[in-house]
Amino acid sequence: MTAAFAPIPFTGAPFQKSEYERRQKEVLEAVARADLDALVVTAHGHLRYLTGYDGMGAYFMPFPLILVPGRAPTYVVREFELNGVRAESCIDEIIAYAEQPDFANVCADALRRLGLASRRVGFELGCWNLAPADVSALQARLPDMKIADASRLVPSVMAVKNELEIKAIRDAMAMTDMAVLAFQRALRDGVTEAEMAATIQGKVREAGGDEVRLVSIGFGDRTKLPHTKLTRHPIRNNEPAMVEVGGTKQGYVGPLVRSAVLGRHSETESLHALAEEALEAAIAAISPGVTAGEVDAAARKVVERSGRPRALNHRVGYQTGAPWNERGNMSLEPGAIDVLEAGMTVHMPVILLGEGGYMSGCSETVLVTERGNEILSRTPHTLYRA
């Protein structure tokens, strides 16, 4: 049981406790539908969704949240991070362990006390932050516990957003649009990737926004990389540029990919024109009742008709919101059977690979609505020419 403690400045879960209780209730309903007796949540994005805690301290040890019908949620965390979990989460029942060798014993004891030693328990076996060794150690201590894969359970609940979440994503996207505008206005001969990143962050802060997540900024030949580290590499005339960025609000993100050329660059211009057409086809396909695979196919057909089918060598998009992306969440990929519903948000980065190795493309974060869809960015996805 967590003891009372004085509030720490600038801490607390992003939403009211009642919002997390609603989410936990919906997840437990999904647990019942899956014929499970309990769920052990370990993916960082899923933990934040259910508790408010961002998982910052769980970067190398599991922090399982145990959800059992009729019981208060139990959080098993590393002792060093205890105050952080108390301050940032909405969970009252917190059990601590010292270091990795202690994890299995402490977690197994918690599962046993919750009456799960011989029950069917779901684990996020296909997600990050849970190692096979962790599962094996728990199974060795609880040999009668039946472990089932529940990797898609929390994402199925997270996928449909309520108005609180949609507002957070809209606010995040407003910051993303500020970041893209800063990127475009600062694009000039000689500016480096690192200087561009500083400019973007500075302009967003000046406008009163939170910091943005810069996944990638690439100039010139470095647009041949799918993701880049920030370097002192400058852009020169007649070279391409690409940025992937997301504003954040209350843990929610508004992802966006935008491309530009300084002068002219024929391969980038050709690729981007095709990416725009494919992205627009995917957006047009989005409405309630459509499958994720059908959205992927709409974009893929455009690329295949162009005679350059190998230009699109990845999925068309994925479920987004909080977090940006998480393994186990809905994926817009060939053959995917997940059905889109109103309230879902998806990010679709259509980035194409050219024969010369350059990559270029654009994306949109799209809200599925009752009548179709809504693009959340106000920044055109056309190629910016500086």
Image (cartoon, rainbow, N blue to C red):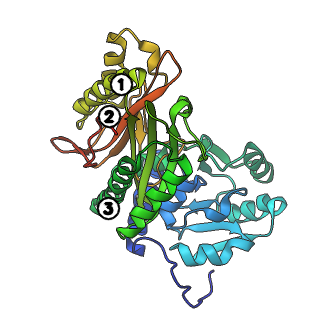
The answer to whether 239 is drawn above or below residue 324 in the figure is above
* Label drawn at residue 171: 3
What is the C-alpha distance between the residues marked 2 and 1? 8 Å
Is tag 3's residue or tag 1's residue first in the polypeptide sequence?
3
- Depth-wise, is mark 2 or mark 3 nearer the camera? 2
Which secondary structure lies at badge 1?
helix
- Inspect the image, locate mark 2, and give the three-letter code of the amino acid beneath it: Leu
**Which residue is farthest right?**
101
Q: Please report contact status of discs 2 and 1: CB closer than 8 Å, yes or no.
A: yes
Front residue (pair 167, 126): 167
**Left or right of 135 in this view: 289:** left
State whether residue 331 appears in this view. Answer: yes
- Rendered location of residue 379, percent (x, y): 27, 46
Is 284 rendered above or below residue 4? above
**Residue 375 location, quadrant:** top left
| Residue at figure coordinates x 60%, y 50% from the top left | 121
Mark 1 is on which residue type? Answer: Glu
Q: Is residue 5 above or below residue 262?
A: below
Return the residue at label 2. 383
Quick check: marks 2 and 3 in contact, CB under 8 Å? no
